Amino acid sequence: MKFISNVKLLLKITQEYVNAQFTIAFSAIFSVLFLLNSFDFANGVWRPYVLAIFVIYACTTLYIWFTTLQIKKDLAKEREIQTRTRLLAYPLMLTVLVGNVFAAGFGFMLATKNKTAEYTFAVYALITQIFILLISALNLFKPYVVDTFLLAMGAFLLLAVLYAVMAVLVARYVTVSDAPKWMIPLGVILLLPALTGNLFSFLLGWTLIKKARNTDPSAVEKWQKIWNKILRNTMAVFGMFFIIFMFSLSVVSSWTFDYDFAVQNNYSALLQTPSLDYPLGTDNFGRDLFSRIVFGAQISLIVGFFSTIIPAVIGGALGAFSGYYGKNTDNIIMRLLDILYAIPGILLAIAIIAAFGANTVNLIIALSVGAIPTYARTMRANVMQIANFEFVESARALGVSDAAIIFKHIVPNSLAPMIVKATLTIGGAVISTSSLSFLGLGIEPHIPEWGNILKVGSTYLETNSYVAIFPGLCIMLLVLSFNFFGDGLRDALDPKTN
């Protein structure tokens, strides 16, 4: 009985086995979804491409289940995963070509014992780049593409090769506590592809430089522990991947996508069902839904980020002054914010947009104003607690100015809860953006934005439901991704778990 309980405990703490359970579940769910969409009930015919993807996903699910049995067998007999079982991971890596990020991620993680944070960043930088290549390649079926298409695709391919090479080098030479000095130039090079929006490349380069220089071992160890906690959370990793993928796609979309397909009317292709020419179909004006959703991600992310950053900065500053000075300053600031907090956020946003007009800047301002009180309350509570610590009293005794104490000593030690709150609420900002656009009070109707697309699709739910389903899925996945990543970040930065 003791042996069985030990094996069960080993299964619970073995990351590969835990990841396998998640991978089987998600791969099976997507298999069912592809099966349900493989038959066109309106025309009574099968969709061969969707059916082929279903077969691949179903076979992948069975293959992962077999691999899981092998992992369980190895842990029961040898107490560790054997090399022959790790070799089963290589076919799973190829599933990234059909968009199965769950199986591909599991395959890369199973392939090596040396799973450092840098290796995870290299793997997901590669997967992100491959996804961008695959999504951009769908434009080849269109009548014409942008002039920069071939140049951009070549650059994306070179970046994918770079990330693949880095994954091999990191798995071989980088340990949990050390990296060779010769990787510093590679780390600097990896900072440049971050301009394409692939933030995994930036994280990989930055952590490699820090670890290779090793000038402050305690700081490196601290960040390593935080990243390890985040990366052990499977859902947080997938959430982080989808956020960075959408951000990167929105950055590079103008190099491989033609904006005219998203905004110009094409009356010869009204409400076309999904095909190779139009992967997600067309809307009631003949505009390519695929291109509109890709370009719409830019607006949703820009508004979501800025309507979170602005109230975080303003509310954080007000909360810092309120918590540090207290008494009259605290009463004045907090009572004014209480008045603002009493007004429903969505109602305040509607009033601001109705007064100043519907455009992107006004939408950001409208969403930012209503969120200031919550950030101010969070920062105030943290500052009031930290202001009584000994290092703050020491700074006062040495004659340090109040501004220096607040912004150099107190605020940096209060940022963790603010960062977590921002990641958890940015999803709400995306929903609010889409909601206001749906009501006609957000982005201008002709501009591709997920709320605008969803508004058009709501009219055709019974006849052409895909016009509403695809933008709705994008909104749902992005909000879920921010929530999953925020949960993982909160667990990693929680002092109780550290």
Image (cartoon, rainbow, N blue to C red):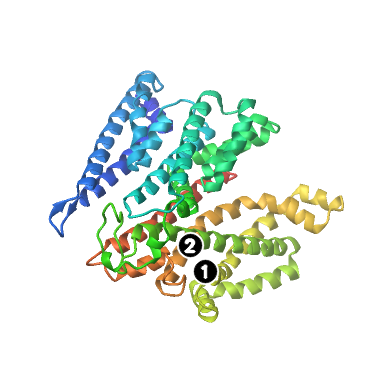
- Identify the mark nearer the N-term, 2 or 1: 2
**Circle 2 crowding by C-alpha within 10 Å: few under 14, some 14–19, many from 20:** many
**Residue pictured at 45% horizontal, 53% vertical:** 253
Residue at disc 2, secondary structure:
helix
Residue 498 in sight from this viewpoint: no
Q: Quadrant location of residue 437?
A: bottom left
Work out how far the residue at label 2 is from the one at label 1, CA to CA, in angstroms. 8 Å
Quarter occupied by the C terminus: top right
Between 101 and 186, the residue placed more toward the observer is 186
Along the horizontal axis of the image, is 477 left or right of 386? left
Is the N terminus in the top left, top right, bottom left or bottom right quadrant? top left
Q: Is residue 198 above or below residue 373?
A: above
| Contact check, label 2 and label 1, Cβ < 8 Å | yes
* Along the line of sight, the residue nearer the viewer: 330 or 121: 121
Q: Position of residue 342 (x, y in %)?
A: 55, 74
Disc 1: CA contacts within 10 A as few (<14), some (14-19) or many (>=20): some
Q: Position of residue 309 (x, y in %)?
A: 59, 59
Residue 357 vertical placement versus 170 (above, below): below
Q: Taking the image as drawn, is residue 409 in sight? A: yes
Would you name the residue on which mark 1 appears?
A: 360
Residue plotted at (37% across, 33% down): 93
The residue singled out by tag 2 in the image is 299
Residue at image x 61%, y 50%? 416
Q: Amino acid at mark 2?
A: Ile
Q: Position of residue 118 (x, y in %)?
A: 54, 34
Residue 108 sits above or below residue 372 on the image: above
- Residue 122: % across, % down: 50, 35
Q: Is residue 192 left or right of residue 432?
A: right
